[in-house]
Image (cartoon, helix red, strand yellow):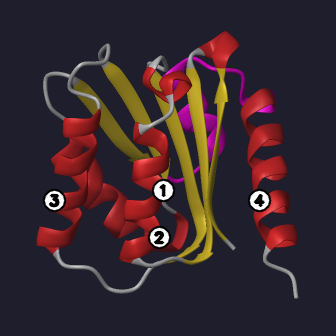
Amino acid sequence: MGIAYRVVESARLNVTVIDGPVTGEDFHSFAHEQANDPAWHATTRSLTDARTAIIPAVTTETVNGFAALYASMRDQDEPYESAIIGGNAFEVAGNYAEFRSDGHTHTIAFNDVVTACIWLRVDSDLVRATIDELREKLRHSSAP
């Protein structure tokens, strides 16, 4: 398990799934992958599904640092809307959203996919299918 994403170019949307146990190193490696992807930089919306993530306890400083990292990665990109479905990590998602909302990016933590899709103005069926495919890929690639 881990982190995976897909860019849905037709919607200028990045869909990310965080599944199972992930570490700070996993997050930084993943951020580096996205930073080097021109298609990711072309998106103007993001939906992250962290409902099945297992994230170790993190400090406010860690969350703030990660938000600052993403802000610096997107500072030359178009304005950005980001939705995070927090699940078990809702508190962490909410803290991240607080730090990640500025004049350039607006981030909100949600409890469910459909509400997040309404806010982002994207097709929830497309997003749910993408989430399911990414989660299956993560689980299949980590199977013994």
Residue 26, labelled with which disc?
2
The residue shown at (17%, 48%) is 68
Element type where label 3 sits in the image: helix
Element type where label 1 sits in the image: helix
Which residue is label 4 attached to?
135
Which residue is label 3 attached to?
64
**Amino acid type shown at disc 4:** Arg
Residue 30, labelled with which disc?
1
Which residue is at the front of the view, 110 or 93? 93
Magenta region, residue range: 110-125
Q: Residues within 10 Å of mark 1 (few under 14, many from 20)?
A: some
- Report which quarter residue 124 is drawn in: top right
In the displayed structure image, the side of residue 94 where residue 139 appears, left or right? right
Q: Are marks 1 and 2 in contact (CB under 8 Å)?
A: yes
Q: Residues within 10 Å of mark 4 (few under 14, many from 20)?
A: many
Q: Is residue 119 among what the camera can see? A: no
**Amino acid type shown at disc 1:** Phe
Q: Where residue 43 sits in the image (x, y, percent)?
A: 49, 20
In the displayed structure image, the side of residue 68 where residue 30 appears, left or right? right
| Viewer-side label of 1, 4 | 1
Element type where label 4 sits in the image: helix
**Amino acid type shown at disc 3:** Asn
Q: Where residue 20 sits in the image (x, y, percent)?
A: 63, 77
Q: Where residue 82 sits in the image (x, y, percent)?
A: 41, 34
Work out which quarter of the rendered image holds the N terminus and state it: bottom right
Q: Earlier in the sequence, mark 3 or mark 2?
A: 2
Which residue is at the front of the view, 115 or 75? 75
Q: Are marks 1 and 3 in contact (CB under 8 Å)?
A: no
Is residue 117 highlighted in magenta? yes
**Amino acid type shown at disc 2:** Asp
Q: Earlier in the sequence, mark 1 or mark 3?
A: 1
Work out which quarter of the rendered image holds the C terminus and state it: bottom right
